[in-house]
Image (cartoon, rainbow, N blue to C red):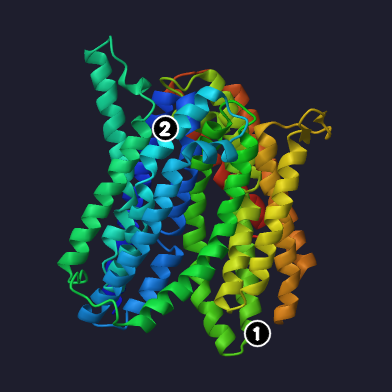
């Protein structure tokens, strides 16, 4: 059993690491090829609807994946294959109908999602959305097959599968660059459908590989009867619908942010680059710190050990803030080196770098609240109390609309700005920070209704001391950077980042130990 677990952990970790690496290379090449320009801006708007479905329906650990794992795991190969095939056909027909609607209404949808982008960007985004619409029906089977493969303990393909789309985009951009060097009269990169077409090809390859793998393990049963295993089908759809709504609420905030971001040129591109830099380490933190706690929470609640649950949760909260405040301070201190090393080349010029640095700092401020909210929401789900997180997510959408509007000046058509605060695209990120902070407070205090009483004053004291340690650390390291940063070369910035990171970590560790808020 130990060997089995080790093999699975290794497969998942190795596959996920390869996917993250491919994603990083993809963003580096996109930045070099497109910078913060109209084409990549338009792609980010065109990808909103297909991306939403690929994440919610076709994503690993999405509602479809989890529902299929729950239903197929106890079934044998033959019966599991029948259920999978029946659900795949019905869901694909439904999503195909949706894709047709999106295709013929792509212009209207772009107008609704991004009313304030330029006419040129709207035309490009509409064209790209039409190219991407086949991803919608493909997302259904991709999500189902993730669940089916994991129900049969095939974890490696699921974890590496997202890399396929990244590799497709990398190939097309490199091919375009090579083609342009040999044919200076033609600029293939200027073809506005390149990113959309590469994404579609990558998604289709992912679809084909997973069909082949599903058939290989005997779960593809085209001769199945539509009248068999109706109960299992209903169970899958019953699990999918509420989970999709709940998961979709957080994605709705992405729609809202992009709607308001359309007022600023290059905002969608800048948000994509900044979010990418933060989400990679944040995802690792979330999976490594939070996921191992959830089974323990469930067991302690089932054993009615409320004291043990409270103790474990407090420990998780302290570790969550200890690591996330460190990460926030790191990004704020070294934003210049990070953006320059990762993105600043080719079409990604100084102006683009300056915009993304500001966005990265704003994202960094919200890291602790994002991770804490993730911990609290998953805590509620682990003790099977899903009602309040759903309500708080819905409230978060209302708050997000208001703060997005307020922090970009409170614009009213034909009346100008009503708010004295106009932070531009940074205001949209600060809105998310404020909303996550409010939702964290609501979720924390509501735990009392679940007989979990947190020592809020003591936690506030410890979090304040962690923040003070990060502030002192950041101020010290930033002062050193100003005196040493005389080189604009990538090698110089890289060495500075390595030296600075080690210094930042050591100082933060020693300060948190001195303040007695670090037990590790």
Residue found at the far bottom of this picture? 303
Tag 2 secondary structure: helix
Residue 343 in the image: state x and y as whole percent: 45, 29
**Distance between the Cα atoms at labels 1 and 2?**
55 Å
Callout 2 environment at 10 Å: few (<14), some (14 to 19), or many (20+)?
Answer: many
Q: Nearer the viewer, residue 391 or 160?
A: 391
Residue drawn at x 47%, y 61% as measured from the top left: 287
Q: Nearer the viewer, residue 366 or 59?
A: 59
Residue 123 in the image: state x and y as whole percent: 48, 27
Mark earlier in primary sequence (1, 2): 2
Labelled pair 1, 2 in contact (Cβ < 8 Å):
no
The quarter of the rendered structure image containing the C terminus is bottom right
Camera sees residue 519: no
Q: Nearer the viewer, mark 1 or mark 2?
A: 2
Residue 420 in the image: state x and y as whole percent: 84, 32
Q: Which residue is mark 1?
A: 306
Tag 1 secondary structure: helix
Indicate whether 154 appears above or below 329: below
Residue 378 in the image: state x and y as whole percent: 57, 68
**Picture quadrant of residue 7:** bottom left
Q: Nearer the viewer, residue 375 or 511?
A: 375
> What's the mark number on residue 127?
2
């Amino acid at each position: 059993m130990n060997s089995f677990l080790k093999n699975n952990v290794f497969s998942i970790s190795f596959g996920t690491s390869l996917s993250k690496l491919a994603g990083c290379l993809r963003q580096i090449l996109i930045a070099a090829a497109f910078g913060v320009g109209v084409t990549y801006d338009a792609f980010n708007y065109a990808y909103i609807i297909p991306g939403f479905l690929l994440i919610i329906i076709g994503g690993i650990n999405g509602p479809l994946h989890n529902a299929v794992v729950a239903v197929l795991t106890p079934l044998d190969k033959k019966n599991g294959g029948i259920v999978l095939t029946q659900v795949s056909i019905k869901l694909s027909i439904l999503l195909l109908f949706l894709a047709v609607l999106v295709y013929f209404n792509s212009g209207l949808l772009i107008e609704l999602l991004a009313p304030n982008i330029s006419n040129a960007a709207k035309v490009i985004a509409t064209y790209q959305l039409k190219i991407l619409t086949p991803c919608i029906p493909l997302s259904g089977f991709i999500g189902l097959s993730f669940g089916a493969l994991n129900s049969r303990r095939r974890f490696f393909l699921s974890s590496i599968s997202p890399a396929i789309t990244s590799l497709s985009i990398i190939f097309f951009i490199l091919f375009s660059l090579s083609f342009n060097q040999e044919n200076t009269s033609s600029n293939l990169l200027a073809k506005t459908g390149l990113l959309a077409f590469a994404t579609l090809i990558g998604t289709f390859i992912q679809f084909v590989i997973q069909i082949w793998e599903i058939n290989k393990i005997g779960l593809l049963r085209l001769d199945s009867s539509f009248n068999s295993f109706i109960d299992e089908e209903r169970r899958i759809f019953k699990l999918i619908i509420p989970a999709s709504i709940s998961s979709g609420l957080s994605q709705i905030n992405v729609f809202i942010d992009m709607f308001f971001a359309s007022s600023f040129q290059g905002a969608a591109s800048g948000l994509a680059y900044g979010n990418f830099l933060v989400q990679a380490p944040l995802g690792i933190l979330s999976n490594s710190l939070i996921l191992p706690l959830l089974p323990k929470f469930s067991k302690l609640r089932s054993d009615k050990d409320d004291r043990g649950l409270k103790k474990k949760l407090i420990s998780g909260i302290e570790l969550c803030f200890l690591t996330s405040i460190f990460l926030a301070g790191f990004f704020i201190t070294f934003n210049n080196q990070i953006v320059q090393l990762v993105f600043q080349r080719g079409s990604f010029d100084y102006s683009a770098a300056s915009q993304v640095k500001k966005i990265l700092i704003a994202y960094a401020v919200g890291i602790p609240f994002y991770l804490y909210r993730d911990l609290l929401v998953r805590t509620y789900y682990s003790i099977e109390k899903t009602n309040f997180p759903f309500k708080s997510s819905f409230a978060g959408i209302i708050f997000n609309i208001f703060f997005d509007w307020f922090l970009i000046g409170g614009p009213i058509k034909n009346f100008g700005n009503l708010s004295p605060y106009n932070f531009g695209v940074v205001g949209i990120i600060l809105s998310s920070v404020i909303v996550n902070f409010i939702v964290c407070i609501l979720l924390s205090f509501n735990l009392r209704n679940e007989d979990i009483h947190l020592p809020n004053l003591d936690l506030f004291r410890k979090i304040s001391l962690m923040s003070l340690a990060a502030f002192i650390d950041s101020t010290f390291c930033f002062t050193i950077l100003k005196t040493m940063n005389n080189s604009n070369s990538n090698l110089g910035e890289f060495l500075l980042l390595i030296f600075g990171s080690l210094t930042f970590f050591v100082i933060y560790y020693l300060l948190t130990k001195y303040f007695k808020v670090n037990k590790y």
